[in-house]
Amino acid sequence: MVADETVSRMHAELSLAPEGVLLTDLGSRNGTYYLGQRVQRIALALGSRFRIGNTELSLECDRQTLDHLQPAEITSYGGALGLSSRMRRLFAVLLRLESSLTNVLLEGETGTGKDLLARAIHDHSQLSSGPYVAINCGMLDRGLARSELFGHKKGAFTGAIENRIGAFEAASGGTLFLDEIGELPLDVQPALLRALESSAIVRIGETVERRLNVRVVAATNVDLGVAAEQKAFRADLYYRLAVVTLRLPPLRERTEDLDALTRHFAEQLGLREIPAELMDELRRRTWPGNVRELRNVLQAYHAVGSFDMNAAGEPNELEGALSRWLNPTADYAVQKQALLDTFQRVYLTLLLRHTQGNQSEAARISGLQRSYLGQLLAKANSSGSR
């Protein structure tokens, strides 16, 4: 019951529907509103906010029920593997979510398998026959992030040489995976929030809304709740993304899975046997790089046929170079952007050298759309000429 004089005795009804939660106004006196518009009947996703009379309500998932689910009997989900109770409890939640299209936020350290689980969520959902589009927000050029997500009209800005759809349109009817969502520039976050709330986007340079059916799965290796409190991430966007939050435990917190994961990767690589001394060393490590590090160690062992126990935990050449270059007392965002600009410039130079200047072939090899590659090249040439 809502204690509000502006709310009618039989104001609105909520019911489950295949596309989400159906909100129906029951002929109320003061109306039912969603995104400022009066509605009679509308399907909403979990996390949506609506108003009846003067009272604003939010559709929230029963997180307590999910948190207390008993571990599932299965020990794998998609490509994810786990015998530990923490992983099997995670699989139990995922099984429960298969009939839902609610947004999901995956939290976990780098290398815990968030991308693998995001793909599994898509493959086990009602949208599995639709497209799966993955975007790493940490690698988006700050000046092109809006275009990458929402697309643009030809001539909307310098370098926009043709109409281009963004990731949301490309994922229509399927799932959009936003990896490293905490790295999304603050000035782009309001547009993402609007897209999630209205299920519609507007391309840069246009005014027409394009309605889409897209499920969003986001991932982060930082605590977005803390980031929101510190104003480093929009709180309203955080709550819209975190309808269901799933935490992937680091490998050091599920060491009972180590042997099974090692056997799994060994089988994939065609390794018949893992030496006892290698297994002993694997069990002693703390795995800061998590499951990805374990897989890389086994790939290295398979490639060279030996395992350097002393060097295994040392930083690789790239990490060493970054350690010498990065300044822990300087601004994070400035250094990250400088690093990204350098990566793009060097990568594009090597790519075009490899293709002898053939940009169509470069786009095919890099997996970038031809128009987006052109934007990156124009930017790199512009910065290089200054």
Image: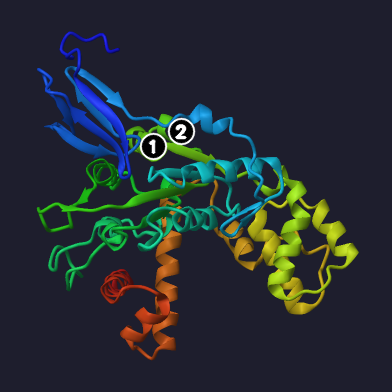
Residue 368 sits in which quadrant?
bottom left
Q: Do the residues under discs 1 and 2 have CB atoms within 8 angstroms?
A: yes
Task: Provide residue 245's location: percent of width, then percent of height.
Answer: 48, 38
Disc 1 residue crowd, few under 14, some 14–19, many 20+, Cα 10 Å: some
- Residue 375's disc is none
The answer to which of 341 and 201 lies nearer the viewer is 201
The answer to which of 374 and 175 lies nearer the viewer is 175
Residue 85 sits in which quadrant?
top right
Residue type at the position of mark 2:
Gly
- Name the residue rendered at 59%, 46% in the picture: 91
Residue furthest to the right in view is 276
Task: Provide residue 369's location: percent of width, then percent of height.
Answer: 31, 73
What residue sits right under mark 2 in the picture?
225
Residue 69 sits in which quadrant?
top right
**Left or right of 111 on screen, residue 165:** left
The answer to which of 49 and 190 lies nearer the viewer is 49
- Name the residue rendered at 30%, 45% in the picture: 19
- Name the residue rendered at 43%, 53% in the picture: 125
The answer to which of 64 and 329 lies nearer the viewer is 64
Q: Quadrant of the C terminus?
A: bottom left
- Residue 238's disc is 1
Residue 150 can be seen in this image: yes
Task: Provide residue 20's location: percent of width, then percent of height.
Answer: 32, 40
Is 320 above or below relative to 45? below
SS state under label 2: helix
